[in-house]
Amino acid sequence: MHRNPLLSSFFILSTTLLFIFSSCGGQSKKSTSADTIALATAPTFIADSAMAYVEAQCAFGPRVPGSAAHEACGDWLAQQFTTLGTTVSEQRTELAGYDGKLLPCRNIMASFHPEATDRILITAHWDSRAWADNDRDAANHHTPVLAANDGASGVAVMLEMARVLPQLPLDCGVDFVCFDLEDQGTPQWAEDDDETDDYNYWCLGSRYWANEAYATGYSARYAINLDMVGGRGARFEIEGFSQQYAAPLVNMVWHLAAQLGYGDYFPLRRAGYITDDHVSVSQFARIPAIDIVPHVSDGHSSFGPTWHTINDTPENIDPAVLKAVGQTLLQLLYNDNNH
C-alpha cells in the first residue's frame, strides 16, 4: 500500500492522560494512568495458532486479486470464520485499478453475536500486492508479494481472536472484515511524478465497504485496523489519522499494551499520517477508527525491510509481535465486559 508518512511531527503522550472509554456493556471507565487500568482476566492469545494462520494463507501463494490463489484463499477464509462460529457474508464487485482495468473485489465479513446492536469492528486486508516494487533488486519489481506480514498477519490475528472469543461471553457484537484491494495502488515504476491523486487507487475494498456500510445504516462504536502486525522489530507508533479520529481509543490501546508488558512494541510516540483502510472507515462509514501499523525505518522504507518485497515471507514473521497485538486487543474487548 502507498503509505506516505505525511506531516511527520513527533510528540510524546503523557502517561497521565484522563481516559473516558465506553465498555461493551455501555459503562464508562476512568483512569488517570496506565498503571491504574483495572484488568479483567482475558483469554490467552496463542501466538503459535496465529502463526499457523499466517502460514496457511501463504501456502496458497500470493493472493493477488483475480488469481486462482486469491479465490481459493478467500474460500478458505470464509470457511475458517464459519467454523469458528461467526456468521459470514461477502461483498463482491469490480473496481477500477490505477491503469483503469477492472479488478475483482471480495470483502469477507464475519460477525460474532450478529444480533447485538452494540458492535466493535476489527479489520485487516487480505490481498497480496501484485508487484514487489520496493524490492532492492529491480528484477523483482514485477513479481507478486507473498504478503506474510502485509496482509496475512492482520487476518491471522483476527482469526485467532475469533477462535478465542467464545471462551467468555461478550455483551457486544464483534465484526471482523477482511478487506480486498487494499494493496493494488500505483506501482512505483508506473508512478507519474506529476500525479497528485494516486491515493485514489489504494484501499479500494475498504472504501467500497465503508460507503455501503454508511448507506445501509451499519454502525459500530469504534474500529481497529491491523496492518503488518507480525514483522520482526515492529514498533507500532501512533498514527496521525488515528489520533485525529479516535484519540480516546488510541490512548486506551497504547496504555493497555504498556500495562500488559508490550510497551516496547507500542511506544507512546507518533509516526505521522498514513493512508490505510482505517481512513476509509473513519471518513466514509463515520466510525472512529485507528490503525495499528508499524513504523520501522531501514533506510529503504518506513515499514520495515520486507515491505513490498519478495522477502515478505513467513520466515520473517515474529510470533511475539502477533502475540503483543492480539493479547492487547483481547484485553481491550474483555476488560470492561467483566467488571
Image (cartoon, helix red, strand yellow):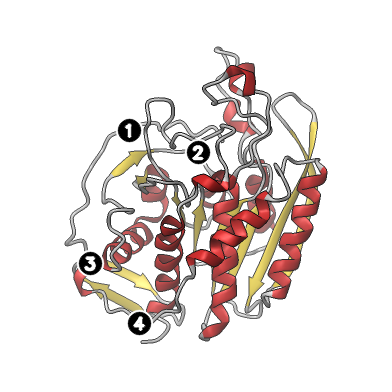
Q: Is residue 233 visible?
A: yes
Marking on residue 34: 3
Q: Amino acid at mark 3?
A: Ala
Q: Whole-Å distance between the Cαs marked 1 and 2?
A: 13 Å
Q: CA distance from mark 1 to mark 4?
A: 36 Å
Q: Using residue 198 as the reference point, say whether residue 63 is left or right of it.
A: right
- Residue under numbered circle 2: 275
Q: Are marks 1 and 3 in contact (CB under 8 Å)?
A: no
Mark 1 nearby-residue class (10 Å; few <14, some 14–19, many ≥20): some
- In primary-sequence order, the first of circles 3 and 2 is 3
Is residue 266 shown left or right of residue 147? Answer: left
The tag earlier along the polypeptide, 1 or 4, is 1
Q: Nearer the viewer, residue 116 or 48?
A: 48
Mark 3 or 4, nearer chain start: 3
At label 2, which amino acid type do we have? Thr
Q: CA distance from mark 1 to mark 3?
A: 25 Å
